Amino acid sequence: MAKDLRPGGDHPVSRTVARLHAELDGLAEVPLFGLGPEETGTTLVELTRLAAQVAELELRVAAHAGEVGVEQQSGATSTASWWAHATRQDRRAAAGRVRLADALGRFHLVRGALAAGGVNAEQARVITRALDALPDDLDADVYERAEKHLVAEAAHHDPTALRVIGKHLLTVVAPEVGEAHDARALEREEQAAAARAFLTICPDGRGSMVGKFSVPEAQGQMLHKALLALSAPKHVTATDGAGTYERRPSPERLGTALVELIERFPADRLPDLGGTNATVVVTMDLHTLLGGLRHASLDTGGVISAAHARRIACEAGIIPAVLGTHSEVLDLGRTTRLFTKAQRTALNQQQPTCTAQGCDWPAYLCHAHHDRPWHSGGGTDLANARNLCPHHHARIHDPTYATERHPDGSVTFHRRV
C-alpha cells in the first residue's frame, strides 16, 4: 500500500485522513449488540453518505495526484497505473475512477453534491457521463440546467433510472433542440443494435445446444417478457409441482421457459426451408411409437429419447415419420393433426382447467392432448381431446407412470411398480 499517513502530516487533508484512520481503528472490534433497528437504519444511511464524502475527497486527491505527477516518483506510466499498483486495485477500475475525478473537476455541482453526501459515486459517474454525451454546440445555460436537473433527480432515482433520464436529458432541459437530438440519437442506437444482432448456436456434445446472442432492445424485451410469463411461479408450480420459487426467475428457470417457448412456437408460421416448413422430422419405428424404449432420430442428425419424442409429437409442430419392420415409411404425419383454434376454444369451454385431478391450471395455458393417440388412429376431435397442463402432459407420456381415466373425465397418475 501507499505510505501510511496515520502519524500525521502538515496539510489539513493529511491530518484529517490520519484522524479518520485512528477513529475507525478504534471501532474495528466494537460489538453492535444494543444497536436498535431505528438507530441501525439511521447509522447505515449516514455511513453511506459518509462513504460518498470520502469518495469525493479521494477522487479530488486523485485528480491532484495527476496534476503533481505522483507517478513520476516510481516511473509509472500514468496516475491510474501508479494508484492501481500502490493500492492493489484493478487497473481498469483505477482508470475509471481517474476519469470520474477529471469529470468532477469540470462539473462542480455534481462534485458538491458528492462532497455533501447527496449523491453516491455511481450516481456521480452516471450523471457526468450523461453530461459529457451532450452536443458540444449548446449554450452554456443549457449545460448548467442539465447538470442541475440530474443532481436534483439523483435525490429520487438510483443509477439505473438516472441513466435512462440522462438519455433524454435535452428533451427536458431544452425541448426546442432536445426532441430532435434524442430522436437522432435513438435512431442511431437502434441502427447500431440491429447491426450488432447475432446468434451462435452449436451442440456441446452432452445433449445440449449452447450459444449466445445479441438483439435490439425491443425484440429482447419481447423475448424476455415471454420467458417471464413461462417462468412465473404459478406456471412453474403447475409444470414442475409444488415448491418455493424466487420472485426473480433464475437463469435455469428462464432456460426451461425458453425450451417451452420453442416447443410451443407454431412451425407453420415460419418461412419455408428447402421447400418445406422449417419443421423437425422425428423418425422412430412403430414399436417405439407405441411405447418402446428405442431412441428416435431427428432429421438434423440428433437423437432423442422415445418418451421425449412421444410427448412433443403430441403438441409441438414436428412430423413423426413412423417406420415398419424393414424401415419402410408406414405413416408420415402432418402438423394438421393439431387441434384448430375453434376446437381449442370449444374444448376450453368444456374443460376450463387441466383435467388431472387436483390441478387448477387454467385451460388457456394447457396443451390439447389426444386421449387415443393420433398415431394409433385417434381423431383430432373434441371427443378425443383433453386439456393437460405442461406438467401433466409430460406425465401422461412418461412410461414410468400409469394413467387412470375416471368417469367424470379426470385422470390420475400412478408410478409403475
Image (cartoon, helix red, strand yellow):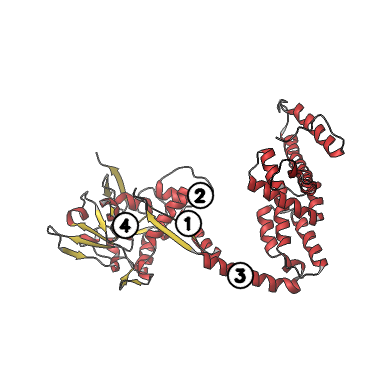
Q: Furthest-front residue in view?
A: 75
At x 61%, y 70%, the residue is 188
Residue bearing mark 1? 227
Secondary structure of residue under mark 3 = helix
At x 84%, y 39%, the residue is 13
User: Does residue 410 show up?
Assistant: yes
Q: Front-most of 328 and 246? A: 328
Secondary structure of residue under mark 4 = helix
On the image, which quarter does residue 20 sit in? Answer: top right
Identity of the amino acid at label 2?
Pro
Residue bearing mark 3? 188
Q: CA distance from mark 1 to mark 2?
A: 9 Å
Secondary structure of residue under mark 2 = loop
Residue bearing mark 2? 249
Q: CA distance from mark 4 to mark 3?
A: 42 Å
Q: CA distance from mark 1 to mark 3?
A: 28 Å
Identity of the amino acid at label 1?
Leu
Residue bearing mark 4? 312
Q: Earlier in the sequence, mark 1 or mark 4?
A: 1
Q: Earlier in the sequence, mark 4 or mark 2?
A: 2
User: Picture coordinates of residue 179 (x, y %)?
Assistant: 70, 72
User: Does residue 389 show up?
Assistant: no
Q: Is there CB contact under 8 Å for labels 1 and 2?
A: yes
